[in-house]
Image (spheres, grey):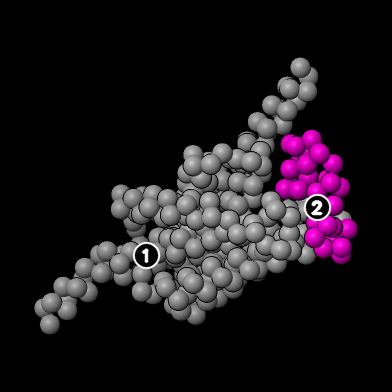
């Protein structure tokens, strides 16, 4: 009975920590947008009806992509590559950092509806927090000056931040928490990595050789596709601008 109460308490505490992370990241994104509006002398709602609808659409696409997981040969099976950050980054560039955080959050909720957690929510927290560490710096850089150069700079910065943060977050929090919630020694997780790569002997070598490359590959691929497609998608996503252009061409 005591073990059951302990397990329930640990899971509740973990979920509360998860919610705290979501709230903190959303607050940062919201404050950045408000500051950008103030600097530009613009007063408008962060969330319009149309933007909320677009958040829903991008969240649905992202949740579907999250279900398509690609195994990587250099990490244990519970680390897989997915491209769910692609619609998140495109949506974030189009509608701002606050919208990006909401897309990330809704993506996780929808994914849990399609497929329940298999990692005691640790995998979902990892996907959300690491994803936000990618889109938040990228979108904030792009928010203040929307050019090709800042989009590229944002993608590079986001990829580097995600790699560094994701590596440290796994080592300091996620791996120990995963071991705790599953009631298994951390050494057992390290052994899974050792079987794939003999150079993995501890937590540090595990995250450097398994987690860091995964985040680099994900960030680079998502960034590349976004930079190649965003310019063509942007006028369609921003309907008002698109309509003005269409009217102008018809008048001409």
Q: Position of residue 210 (x, y in %)?
A: 75, 61
Q: Position of residue 118 (x, y in %)?
A: 64, 41
Left or right relative to 197: residue 230: left
**Mark found first going from the N terminus, 2 or 1:** 1
The residue that mark 2 highlights is 192
Residue 41, numbered label: 1
Q: Which stretch appears magenta? A: 173-201
Disc 1 packing (10 Å; few <14; some 14–19; many ≥20): few
- Separation (CA) of disc 2 from disc 1: 54 Å
Numbered disc 2: secondary structure: helix
Residue drawn at (25%, 64%) of the image: 240
For the question of whether residue 30 can be seen, the reply is: no
For the question of whether residue 237 can be seen, the reply is: yes
| Towards the viewer: 121 or 44 | 121
For residue 150: magenta?
Answer: no
Mark 2 vs mark 1: in front? 2
For residue 197: magenta?
Answer: yes
Left or right relative to 46: residue 196: right
Name the magenta segment's main secondary structure.
helix
Residue 190, numbered label: none
Q: Quadrant of residue 71?
A: bottom right
Q: Residue furthest left?
A: 251
Q: Position of residue 186 (x, y in %)?
A: 83, 45
| Towards the viewer: 195 or 207 | 195
Numbered disc 1: secondary structure: loop
């Amino acid at each position: 009975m005591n073990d059951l109460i302990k397990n329930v308490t640990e899971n509740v505490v973990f979920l509360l920590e998860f919610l705290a992370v979501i709230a903190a990241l959303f607050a940062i994104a919201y404050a950045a947008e408000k500051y950008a509006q103030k600097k530009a002398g613009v007063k408008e709602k962060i969330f319009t009806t149309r933007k909320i609808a677009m958040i829903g659409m991008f969240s649905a696409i992202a949740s579907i992509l999250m279900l398509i997981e690609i195994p990587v040969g250099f990490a244990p099976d519970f680390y897989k590559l997915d491209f769910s950050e692609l619609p998140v980054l495109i949506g974030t560039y189009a509608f701002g950092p606050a919208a990006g955080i909401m897309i990330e959050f809704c993506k996780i909720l929808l994914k849990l509806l399609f497929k329940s957690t298999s990692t005691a929510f640790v995998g979902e927290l990892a996907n959300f927090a690491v994803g936000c560490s990618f889109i938040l710096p990228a979108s904030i850089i792009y928010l203040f000056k929307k050019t090709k150069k800042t989009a590229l700079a944002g993608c590079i910065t986001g990829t580097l931040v995600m790699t560094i943060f994701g590596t440290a977050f796994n080592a300091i929090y996620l791996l120990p928490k995963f071991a705790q919630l599953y009631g298994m020694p951390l050494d057992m997780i390290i052994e899974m990595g050792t079987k794939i790569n003999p150079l993995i002997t501890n937590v540090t070598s595990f995250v450097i050789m398994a987690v860091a490359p995964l985040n680099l590959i994900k960030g680079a691929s998502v960034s590349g596709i976004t930079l190649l497609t965003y310019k063509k998608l942007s006028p369609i996503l921003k309907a008002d601008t698109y309509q003005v252009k269409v009217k102008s061409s018809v008048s001409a």
